[in-house]
Image: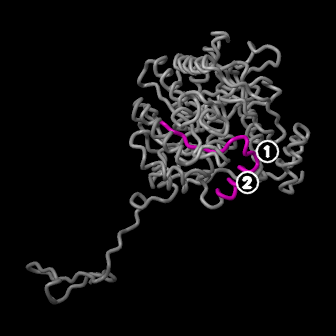
Amino acid sequence: MFGNSPFSFQEPLGETDYKDEELCWSVPQYPYQPIQHPFIMPSPEVSHALTLGQSLTFPFSGKTAKNKLMKSAMSERLSTFSSYDPMERGQPTEELVRLYETWAIGDIGIMVTGNIQIKKDHLEASGNAIIDWDLPRSYLEDFKEVARAAKSHGSLVLGQLSHPGRQVSITIQPYPESSSAIEHPPTSGVLFARPTPLTKDGIKDIVKRFAYAASFLQKAGFDGVQIHAAHGYLIHQFLSRRSNNRTDEYGGTLQNRMRLLLEIIAEIKWAVNDPTFMLSVKINSEDSVPDGIDLEESIITAKVLEAAAVDLIEISGGTYEQGQQLAQHRTLFSAAREAYFIDFADQLRPHLRQSRIAVTGGFRTTRAMAEAINLGSTDVIGIARPLTAEPLLVKAILRGTKMEAKSDKLPPIQLLRLAASGSQIVEIGNGEDITDFDSTFNVSRFIARMLKEIPASMSELLSIHNCST
């Protein structure tokens, strides 16, 4: 009567049958299988997009990011620079504004700027943006333009504040300052001068400069700041026993080595006087060098930062000193698990109750990103270099049209890959087409250019990997 229907009319067979006054039918005896409707069982693209697209509210400032994807800091080097006159340095340019306008279109939840320096004569590189109380106040209008551009599509924007300490090329600063007079070893052909230990008055000056820069960015319209305490720069130099042999209250125990960072946080909070101003700190998971910061110290540091009401703790790793060894390690590790520092995040997570965690480094697929969120390893996914190759990558991920960042054919050489990403930043800032490094021809041409610009270090690195142009 009903063709191939599993239900058939028949005489009652027992207690498993259902009966009314006129009809009797038996229940089919096989497991129920629900229809896989696309809205009930979403595709991986949709599932990942839903996970990553969730908003996130930060516990202390109350700020809310529209999604869980963050552009991590990259050195843009698109501000003014003069080798002769420090008063003509650090002013944001139209190219820097255009760069952040482009990234803003990509619907990134949080954007962290490149390292803004707090002293005009202590730079990570030429072209850094600078906030220094000696520089013209007119710079405020330029930083307002950067904030306007970056926030134009609803992103939260944090200005990363930094001081290079001893980790600055001798050609830029022949008289660096640091926690101690421990010279940075030459790395990838870059020479560093022997630093002068900061006096206590010098430390107080550093603290006030960080606070001034944060207040400056607040006036410019930024949502908050990130303190750069990783990657071998000044604050990291105080945190690490490898670069800090002081015998006063800023050296020795971890509590003492953290003192500069905590004083900066306290001074920033006093200067901005706004509980809704967001505060983030970037730390190393571990340094992977003798006498460097280890896993236990990093966990303690993160717990203290939470007690200091830091909204977002970004986990990264490595130092400039590690150079090529770090690049080789990361390449092997990412092949196994993609995210470089997710293991540390797993160990840190149980120790934090309020501060949010961001993990940066290695993420390339939405599968790994969504998995890290769903497993509770991290709250925020930090993305850096993929966004120089594809500025609108986040928008594509959230629309479910991309599940993986664009690949490239660059050799696994940290210096080369950083330079390639930097060249793409310049192209975006200039409104030019972005070089596709998935092209062997483009890679060969770029390596040839690099050999002309920094021949000694690049030739050495290329020979290690048997790469040729």
Q: Residues within 10 Å of mark 1 (few under 14, many from 20)?
A: some
| Magenta stretch contains residue 21 | no
Q: Give the residue type at disc 2.
A: Gln
Task: Please state which of residues 236 and 77 is positioned toward the viewer in this rendering.
Answer: 236
Name the side, left or right, on which 312 lies relative to 444: left
Spatial separation of the CA atoms under disc 1 and disc 2:
13 Å
Image coordinates for residue 172, horizontal then vertical, percent: 79, 25
Q: Residue furthest left?
A: 21
Image coordinates for residue 232, horizontal then vertical, percent: 67, 37
Q: Residue furthest front?
A: 247
Whether residue 185 is visible, yes or no, is: yes
The main secondary structure of the magenta stretch is helix
Task: Please state which of residues 68 and 180 is positioned toward the viewer in this rendering.
Answer: 180
Q: Residues within 10 Å of mark 2 (few under 14, many from 20)?
A: few
Whether residue 104 is visible, yes or no, is: no
Residue positioned 62% across, 35% down in the render? 236
Residue positioned 63% across, 39% down in the render? 241
Label disc, if present, on residue 328 of the rendered structure = 2
Residue positioned 72% across, 24% down in the render? 196
Q: Give the residue type at disc 1.
A: Leu
Q: Are marks 1 and 2 in contact (CB under 8 Å)?
A: no
Q: Label 1 belongs to which residue?
A: 416
Say if 446 sits above or below 75 in the image.
Answer: below
Q: Nearer the viewer, mark 1 or mark 2?
A: 2
What secondary structure is found at the residue carrying circle 2?
helix
Task: Please state which of residues 315 and 201 is positioned toward the viewer in this rendering.
Answer: 201
- Magenta residues span 312-334
Q: Earlier in the sequence, mark 1 or mark 2?
A: 2
Please state, as top left, top right, bottom left or bottom right, where the N terminus lies in the image: bottom left
Image coordinates for residue 407, horizontal then vertical, percent: 70, 53
Name the side, left or right, on which 333 lies relative to 421: left
